[in-house]
Amino acid sequence: MATLQYQCTMSLDGFIAGPDGDMSWLTGHLGPNPAADRVMERTGALLVGRRTFDGDDPYRGTEHEGEPYGGGWDGPLFVLTHHAPDTPVPGVTFVGDLDGGVAAAGAAAGDGYVGVLGAQVAAQCLDAGVLDEIFVCIAPVLLGDGVRLFDRPGGTEVTLERLGLTEAPGATNLALRVVR
Ligand SMILES: NC(=O)c1ccc[n+]([C@@H]2O[C@H](COP(=O)([O-])OP(=O)(O)OC[C@H]3O[C@@H](n4cnc5c(N)ncnc54)[C@H](OP(=O)(O)O)[C@@H]3O)[C@@H](O)[C@H]2O)c1
C-alpha cells in the first residue's frame, strides 16, 4: 500500500511559494540533497494540485524547465482539477476529486510514496485523514508572504512524530509522520 507524503521546500517562516506563487527564491537552494534523492527514488507517483502544475517553476530558463523536480524524478502525474484541459498531456491524468486522485495515484505508486505537491491538496489530504507523512526541506530564507505550508483556518490540532532530520548544503530536511 502506498504512503501519501506531502513533499515540499519551505521557507523558515512557513511558506512554500512567495507572493503570487513566485518560486524564484527556491532556485538558490536546489543543491545536492541525498535525503531528498532517496525520497525521490521511493516515489512512485505524484498527486499534484492544478496551481502547482500550472505554476511558477524554480527551474525556469534551464533545460529541465517543466519537468517534475527539475528532471530529478520521472513517473505518472495525477493532477487534481475541476477543469481538465481538452487536450491530453502525456504522462498526466487529470482527476476531478480528491478520493479519485488519492486512489489512482496510490494504485500507480504501489508500495512507494505518492508525493503530494501543493498546499491546498496537502491540507485536504490531512483533513480527510489520508496524509501519512510530510517531508519538508527547510530553506534558510524568510519570504514574508505567500502560500503557507498548511492554511487551515479553524483547523484542528494534528500531532506529528519526527521520523528523521538530515542536513544538506541548501536545506535542513525534516521527515514527519502524521499521528492518527
Ligand atoms: N516549495 C515547494 O516545494 C512547492 C511544491 C509544490 C508547489 N509549490 C507552490 O505552491 C503553490 C500551489 O499551491 P496551492 O496550495 O496554491 O495550490 P495547489 O494545491 O497546487 O492547487 C490547488 C488547485 O488544485 C485543484 N484542486 C484542489 N483540490 C481539488 C479537489 N478536491 N478536486 C479537484 N480539484 C482540486 C483546484 O484547481 P482548479 O481550480 O483547476 O479546479 C485548486 O485550485 C504554487 O505556487 C506552487 O509553485 C511549492
Image: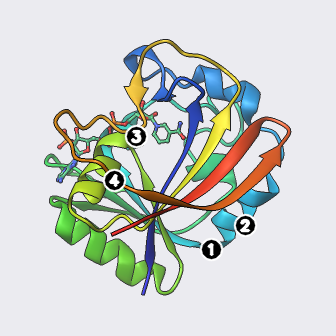
Mark 1, residue position: 42
Given contact means CB atoms under 8 Å apart, are the residues at marks 2 and 4 in contact?
A: no
Given contact means CB atoms under 8 Å apart, are the residues at marks 1 and 2 in contact?
A: yes
Spatial CA distance of label 4 from label 3 is 24 Å
Residue at screen point 30% across, 68% down: 130
Q: Earlier in the sequence, mark 1 or mark 3?
A: 1
Residue type, numbered disc 4: Val
Kindly state the secondary structure of the residue where label 1 is placed. helix
In screen coordinates, is 42 left or right of 122?
A: right
Mark 3 beta carbon near ligand 1 (under 8 Å) = yes
Q: Nearer the viewer, mark 2 or mark 3?
A: 2
Given contact means CB atoms under 8 Å apart, are the residues at marks 2 and 3 in contact?
A: no
Residue 159, located in which quarter of the rendered image? bottom left
Residue 7 or 174: which is nearer the viewer?
Answer: 174
Q: Earlier in the sequence, mark 1 or mark 4?
A: 1
Spatial CA distance of label 2 from label 3 is 22 Å
Q: Earlier in the sequence, mark 4 or mark 3?
A: 3
Mark 4, residue position: 158
In screen coordinates, is 47 left or right of 136?
A: left
